[in-house]
């Protein structure tokens, strides 16, 4: 019980920190390139995780026993979170966050085809209710559909595939080994994008609306440098806390508390942009979060923890 309590606290704190990271990224979206943020965050993440492993006397490995699968997971991580952060720069941060939280539904569905898991009528109905929350938030039926709402769903889908791969590679690769390799892939791809469009040559009226992708890389100004370093540090610290929470606690007990990050995202959206969820958005959030928590409960009850064994970030 004590370990579960500690795990719950770690999850809530780490998800709050992740929300702070997301707020900082959105604040910087008007000033610098997303690829610059991803590049710097990945480099800082590798350095901090390596330092943590050194301090805790664990081996530091930059390679993988599954080159193809790990590379695929790195690509999914890069493109998935690129889509998420770009969408986050265009829509309320809480909306992007809650749409990403459908990832456990995708994980459960994929477990049927990948691991042959059995999913009963109750869980299918629960997932249908959760996906209906997506429709309620995006409102496609009244002409109010926003294309950017598709991107967090794409992130949730790529994340689900990534977690399937993680279960295969966990046999020989440690979680730190997996994350370091993902960060290295992200740094490499972000660096390529920086060399390709990081000089600002594409930051023109022709590409209006894509400024977060096409802006030149900048390291001028103490605010930008401090913000980028902060993003890298808090993101890595949150990951380490979340990893330790799953290490010391029962996953099915602590996983539902990852939804606490939505509250922090809503608070950040209100404080910095005055975002207040409209009635239909609040209803959609309740449907998604409520269904997700019930899904975890059902999996724990049936002894099938596919969606609950891994953190959502």
Image (cartoon, rainbow, N blue to C red):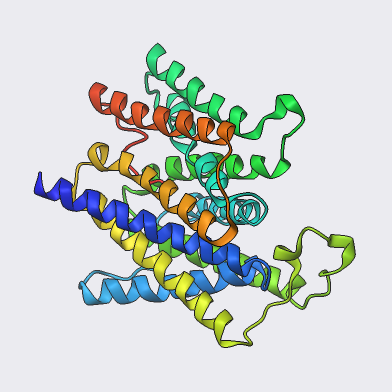
Label tally: 0
Q: Nearer the viewer, residue 307 or 95?
A: 95
Q: Nearer the viewer, residue 183 or 123?
A: 123
Is residue 309 visible to us here?
Answer: no
Compared across the picture, whether 50 is left or right of 106 comes to: left
Find the residue positioned furthest to the right: 206
Find the residue positioned furthest to the top: 121
Q: Quadrant of residue 208?
A: bottom right
Q: Quadrant of residue 34?
A: bottom right
Is residue 60 visible to us here?
Answer: yes
In the picture, which quadrant includes the N terminus? top left
Compared across the picture, whether 293 is left or right of 148 comes to: left
Percent position (x, y) of residue 204? 86, 68
Percent position (x, y) of residue 301? 24, 23
For the point 13% across and 50% down, which residue is it?
A: 3
Percent position (x, y) of residue 198? 73, 74
Compared across the picture, whether 215 is left or right of 111 comes to: right
Rendered position, 62 above or below 130: below
Q: Nearer the viewer, residue 185 or 132?
A: 132
For the point 49% across and 35% down, which residue is it?
A: 285
Percent position (x, y) of residue 22? 51, 60
For the point 45% across and 74% down, which residue is it?
A: 230
Rendered position, 116 above or below 234: above
């Amino acid at each position: 019980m004590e370990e579960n309590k500690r795990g719950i606290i770690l999850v809530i704190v780490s998800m709050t920190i992740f929300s702070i990271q997301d707020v900082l990224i959105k604040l910087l979206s008007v000033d610098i390139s997303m690829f610059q943020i991803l590049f710097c965050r990945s480099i800082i993440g590798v350095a901090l995780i390596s330092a943590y492993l050194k301090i805790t006397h664990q081996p530091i490995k930059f390679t993988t026993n599954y080159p193809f699968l790990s590379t695929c997971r790195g690509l999914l991580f890069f493109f998935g979170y690129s889509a998420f952060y770009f969408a986050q720069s265009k829509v309320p941060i809480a909306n992007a966050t809650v749409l990403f939280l459908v990832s456990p539904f995708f994980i459960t569905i994929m477990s049927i085809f990948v691991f042959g898991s059995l999913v009963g009528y109750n869980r299918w109905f629960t997932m249908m209710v959760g996906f209906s929350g997506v429709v309620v938030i995006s409102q496609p039926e009244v002409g109010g559909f926003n294309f950017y709402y598709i991107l967090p769903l794409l992130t949730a889908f790529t994340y689900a595939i990534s977690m399937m791969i993680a279960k295969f590679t966990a046999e020989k690769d440690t979680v730190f080994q997996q994350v370091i390799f993902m960060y290295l892939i992200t740094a490499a791809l972000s660096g390529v994008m920086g060399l390709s469009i990081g000089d600002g040559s594409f930051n023109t009226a022709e590409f209006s609306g894509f400024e977060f992708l096409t802006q030149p890389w900048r390291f001028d100004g103490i605010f930008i440098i401090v913000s980028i370093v902060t993003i890298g540090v808090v993101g890595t610290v949150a990951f380490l806390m979340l990893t330790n929470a799953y290490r010391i606690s029962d996953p099915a007990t602590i996983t539902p508390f990852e939804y606490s990050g939505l509250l922090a995202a809503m608070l950040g959206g209100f404080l910095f942009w005055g975002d207040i969820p409209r009635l239909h958005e609040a209803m959609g959030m309740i449907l998604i979060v409520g269904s997700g928590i019930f899904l975890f409960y059902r999996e724990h009850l049936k002894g099938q923890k596919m969606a609950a064994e891994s953190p959502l970030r």
